Amino acid sequence: MASSTPTEVYLIRHGIAAERGTYADDTQRPLTQRGRVKTVAIAQRLKQWGLRFDRMLTSPLVRARQTAEILQAAGLANRAERFEPLVPGGQLQTWLDWLAVQPDDLRSLALVGHEPDLSSWGERLVNGETNERWVLKKAGIIGLQLPVGESAIANSQLFWLAPPRFVL
């Protein structure tokens, strides 16, 4: 990406999902009714604030896809694109490699995924390392501004680290 304008990246954790162990296959755990309601309320608030994503990538796991669908339905993005590196344990560098070949006009990007990966990615982008101090609550958001013309790792700027209660 050779843009002269920074890209804002929003790391969004999926909403409240069914408890671990309630599904034989963890990838199939859906959002709970409470999780849906809370995520819809957050999406509506983000829309009220004028937030809009040029692109939205989501983990293929059910709970993340459902969260992305809610954000899309609220008008925050045209569509949600499945992105395998957002599965639990996905690699930050794989996403950075993807980002490097995107068009210059990508200004706002949402990544819908899981913990502890999203917090870890955020910490590495801002601090250059992971100290496991950041915690992203379910349906929480980390907002980062990526630098122009230099490595995003250790050079990104944090502008938002919000649990859902601060959005609602």
Image: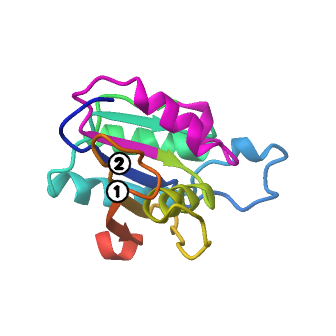
Q: Residue drawn at (51%, 31%), measured in percent from left and top?
A: 97
Q: Is residue 97 above or below residue 164?
A: above
Identity of the amino acid at label 1? Answer: Leu
Q: Which residues are magenta?
A: 83-111
Q: Badge 1 local density, few (<14 within 10 Å), some, or many (20+)? A: many
* Residue 109 percent coordinates (x, y): 34, 41
Mark 2 touching mark 1, by CB under 8 A? yes
Lower position in the chain sequence, tag 2 or tag 1: 2
Residue drawn at (29%, 36%) of the image: 77
Number of numbered labels in the structure image: 2
Instruction: Identify the element where label 1 is drawn.
Output: strand
Identify the residue under disc 1.
144
Cα distance between the residues tagged 2 and 1? 5 Å
Q: Is residue 85 magenta?
A: yes
Counting from the top left corner in percent of width and height, residue 2 is at: 28, 29
Q: Quadrant of the C terminus?
A: bottom left
Residue matched to label 2: 9
Q: Quadrant of residue 92?
A: top right
